[in-house]
Amino acid sequence: MHKLYSKQAFAAAGLLTAPFHHFRRNDQVRLGDIPFGLPLVVKPVQEGSSVGISIVRKESDLPAALECAFAYDDEVLVEQYIKGQEVQVGILDNQPIGAIEIVPKNEFYDYEAKYTDGMAEHIFPARLDKDLYQKALLTGGETHRALGCRGYSRVDLLVTAAGECFVLEVNTLPGMTSLSLFPEIAAKGAGLSFEELVVKIVESSSLTNR
């Protein structure tokens, strides 16, 4: 997923997404060039699974974060850091089916937390009040449609203490492993077994269901 194009689509659809700035490999990047303050999140434009992502809390950490991101891509995004609950919304048959909260043991939901058992706690349903939970589901559905997704996806949000739902990104091919969130959302939110979920995915993605 191209993070820059996605964020532009989110903004065009009126969805909340963290303020961002885009840099290419040969750009001279200084903190003063970034139109918002610390802390920052630095990420490659086209990597997944949180590969190459760093949180920058002081100016001296910025060069290393950029070097890490540029190791994976010729373009990077620098985003304003948003503090909030990490909430992921499952979409199936183009409809939200549930929202799960992630509580990582590391600073954020990084590669290790995603693929190592015991490195993140999954809480379903997400610990949001009724209205905010519905808002998260609605935001997930709107985001799915804003990118022209069809069938199924997983929408990653940050939900702030002020009740704002910031869109992080959309996973159009969410994982289906024993640690993956989409099957867990489907099981707990829609009562679907893994086998039933696979059938639903195939049916919802069929060319005849456009």
Image (cartoon, helix red, strand yellow):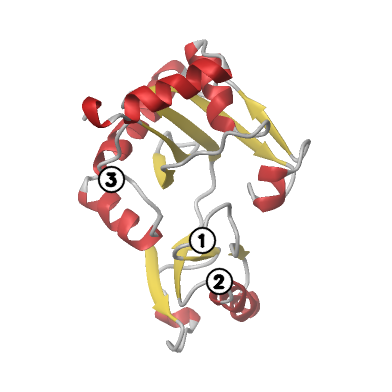
Q: CA distance from mark 3 to mark 2?
A: 24 Å
Secondary element under disc 3, as helix, strand or loop, is: loop
Residue 6 picture location, percent across and down: 33, 54
The residue under label 3 is 147
Which quadrant of the rendered structure holds the C terminus?
top left
Considering depth in this image, is 153 or 85 the residue closer to the camera? 153
Q: Position of 145 compared to 133: left or right? A: left
Reading the chain from its start, which is encountered first: label 3 or label 2? 2
- The residue at which mark 1 appears reads as 47
Q: Are marks 3 and 2 in contact (CB under 8 Å)?
A: no
- Residue placed most toward the observer, 11 or 146: 146
Q: Which residue is mark 2?
A: 72
User: Measuring 35% from the left and 62% from the top, which residue is drawn there?
Assistant: 4
Q: How far across and down, in percent of the image, does residue 195 sit?
A: 54, 18
Residue type at mark 2: give it: Tyr
- Residue 75, percent across and down? 43, 74
Query: Where, by quadrant of the figure, is residue 205 drawn?
Result: top left
State whether residue 92 appears in this view: no
Q: Who comes first in sequence, dot 1 or dot 2?
A: 1
125 over 171 or under it: above or below: above
Name the residue type under label 1. Answer: Glu
Q: Secondary structure at mark 1?
A: loop
Q: Evaluate whether residue 188 shows in this view.
A: yes
Q: Residue at x 30, y 39 (%)?
A: 149
Residue shown at 56% from the left, 38% from the top:
175
Label 3 CA crowd tier, 10 Å (few <14, some 14–19, many 20+): some
In front of the other: 23 or 172: 172
